[in-house]
Amino acid sequence: MSHSRAGGGRLLHEAERMLGMRAFLAPTAPPESDNPPGLFVREDTFRVTGVWPQEKEWWLPPCVVSVKHGETGVPLQLASVHLSFRLPGRRRMEAGNIATWHRPDRAVLLGGDFNSYSASGQEQQPFPDWPNILDRTHQEHRTRGGSESDTEPDRALTRVGIDDVALHAATRLGQADALAPTASQYPHVNLRQGPPQRIDFQRASRVLLPTLREFKVIPLPELSDHPLLVSVWDEEAFMTGLARQPEFDYRQAHTR
């Protein structure tokens, strides 16, 4: 949500008007990256019940909003996140922070740039050949110990039942394009950093995944070096999934 605070939030409020949605911004970002995560919520679908600013133990503070869908009594935690681009250890800590949002009485739906990789083994491209890439700084940022691709945030969130939505679309709905790479897409970048990779994710509480109908990766090369990720959900089934959340056994159910 770059530039969204400028001019009293002029661009933010113009976007609200154009979309017919209510906007939320994360707390102030650090000076070196004034790109706060944000959310737009359609209030005729979701009733906002809380906003949770978080600043400690994050590189970029996330945007976290609690809502309820219809008359269901189970809150849904919506979030936009951007994990640290430079420190694997901090990303692991940030994933631990995300895990706290998921509880028996609350489901989670989030999206963001994780600056790390899937541990699924289902990706369209191999991980970079780290000893032979030219960008040594990138190697330090994206690996553990210089040779192991960082998949810890994915592993941590999967263990607690906040699953990779695109992976579910690819493996359960047959939508292979859901796993299209989302970074290092430009030739001048991947010459130095290795083949394009999927580092942007939507993640959801496992109980919600059966309600997913479609997942799309839409390139926007004229606007961003990351594509747009779009998930489509069955509304009635989504409400049923939320209602099941308090009794759902995450020890037994797994998407992989």
Image (spheres, grey):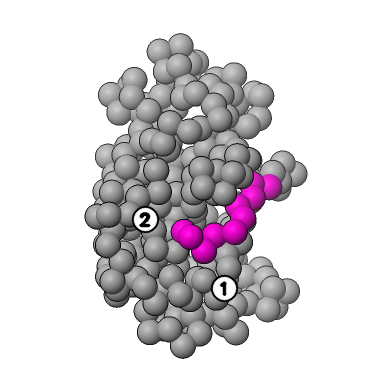
The residue sitting at 66% across, 24% down in the picture is 187
In the drawing, does residue 55 fall left or right of residue 226? Answer: left
The residue that label 2 is drawn on is 162
Is the magenta region chiefly helix, strand or loop?
A: strand
Q: Quadrant of the N terminus?
A: bottom right
Earlier in the chain: of badge 1 and badge 2, it is 2
Residue at x-position 64% and y-position 50%: 216
| Three-letter code, disc 2 | Ile
Is 63 situated above or below 152?
below
Q: Which residues are magenta?
A: 209-218
**Which residue is disc 1 drawn over?**
235
- The answer to if 4 sits in the magenta stretch is no
Residue occupying the far top of the picture:
132
Q: Position of residue 117 (x, y in %)?
A: 43, 36
Report x, y in % for residue 65.
43, 73
Q: Nearer the viewer, mark 1 or mark 2?
A: 1
